[in-house]
Image: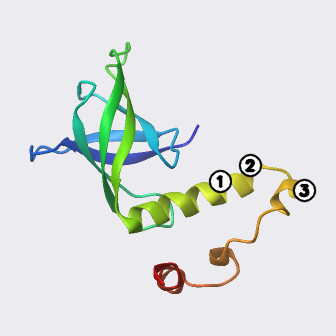
Amino acid sequence: TADYPMWMRVQGDATKLKGRMRDLTAKGSMVTTSAHFEPGDLVEIIFQLPEFAVNRLIAQVVYSDTTDENGVNRFGLRFIHVNPRAREAITWFLYDRIQALYNEELREMYPENPGRIGLQPAKLRELAAR
């Protein structure tokens, strides 16, 4: 499973903590970090998916898994405030992953990603903002 570097912090606290974003969906993610959070905590996530700008969102911790033998904690997050730019990045990233993972017949059922047919990212964002 691919994972992506991220920073996170409890809302209202200036301390940024390193983590890794894993198992990303449109509504949440599993993250790993050496930090400790409790279910119900609201955290700000700062992340960058491949080929996209840095984004921020607010998530709520919905489950926590105790530290493993390497000192890593796992947390399930539910996204509760996602700005339009972050939602667009997550949506296009997941769309590309679906196309890459499924066979040719299934990919034919979906339209081509305009970003893959020569549109520059700035133009793609401009079209999406309309």
| Image height of 8 relative to 104, above or below | above
Rendering coords of residue 130 (x, y %): 48, 84
* Residue matched to label 3: 105
Q: Secondary structure at mark 3?
A: helix
Residue neighbourhood size for the residue with mark 2, other residues' Cα within 10 Å, grouped as few (<14), some (14–19), many (≥20): few
Residue in the image at 85% along x and 63% along y: 108
Q: Are marks 3 and 1 in contact (CB under 8 Å)?
A: no
Q: Secondary structure at mark 1?
A: helix
Q: Is residue 35 left or right of residue 102?
A: left
Rendering coords of residue 98 (x, y %): 69, 52
User: What's the mark number on residue 97?
Assistant: 1
Query: Type of residue at label 3?
Result: Glu
Residue in the image at 9% along x and 43% along y: 13
The scheme the figure's colours follow is rainbow
Q: Nearer the viewer, residue 49 or 10?
A: 10
Residue in the image at 90% along x and 56% along y: 105
* Residue matched to label 2: 101
